[in-house]
Amino acid sequence: MEEKAEDQDGMEEAERDLLTDLRRARRSLRLQGMDEPPAASCLTPGQRIAGAVATVMGSWTFIIIQSAILFVWIAANLAGAIRGWDPYPFILLNLALSFQGAYAAPVIMMAQNRQQDIDRTAAENDYRINVKAELEIELLHEKIDQLREREVLKLTEAVRMLTELLEQSGSGACGSDAEGGRPS
């Protein structure tokens, strides 16, 4: 069995250092949260625009409105309401949709990258919290084990003392029975 370098509370030095670092980080984050404005106000204009574009283009409202515009465009050109404007292969419509896709895709990717960074930070914080909780639970288990050991030692000592008392009272009772039981 491996021997671990443990202190009196049963934690390894690396665990103790990690727990201390996590407590210090928690305190600094708690104080930092009071001094700094919310994260949304720290966004650059490009990030705010990317978020707004991704929100609009990723909605059912946008899909329905764009589908209606495409339907009207195709219907108007097929019916000949606008003569010679964008005939059947709809090259102008194709150009407009390509233009929209060429600009929308990178903007949406920027918003996704920002969200990915937010999610990564949240996952790192969750991991740190889980490690800290695990170490705190381990520390509580150690304390409970120590209390249990003390209690077992006290109970063992109490049983030993009671056994001695019973032996003394038993030997004293036997001696008095022996003296009192014989006729003189």
Image (cartoon, helix red, strand yellow):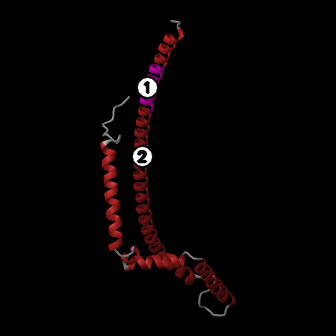
Mark 1 belongs to which amino acid?
A: Arg
Residue 67 position in % (x across, y down): 63, 80
Instruction: Name the residue nearer the viewer: 98 or 146.
Output: 146
What's the residue at 31%, 58% (across, down)?
A: 24
Q: Is residue 159 magenta?
A: yes
Residue 88 percent across, percent down from the top left: 64, 83
Residue situated furthest top in the rendering:
184
Nearer to the camera, 43 or 14: 14
Question: Number of marks in the image?
Answer: 2
Local secondary structure at mark 2: helix
Disc 2 designates what residue? 140
Determine which of the numbered discs, if any, sits on residue 1 in the image: none
Which region shows up in magenta? 155-169
> Of discs 1 and 2, which sits in the foreground?
1
Q: In the image, residue 120 lies at what x, y percent?
A: 42, 61
The tag earlier along the polypeptide, 1 or 2, is 2
Q: Residues within 10 Å of mark 1 (few under 14, many from 20)?
A: few
Query: What residue would you read off at disc 1?
Result: 160
Residue type highlighted by circle 2? Leu
- The kind of secondary structure element at disc 1 is helix
Q: Quadrant of the N terminus?
A: top left
In the image, farthest residue toward the right:
79
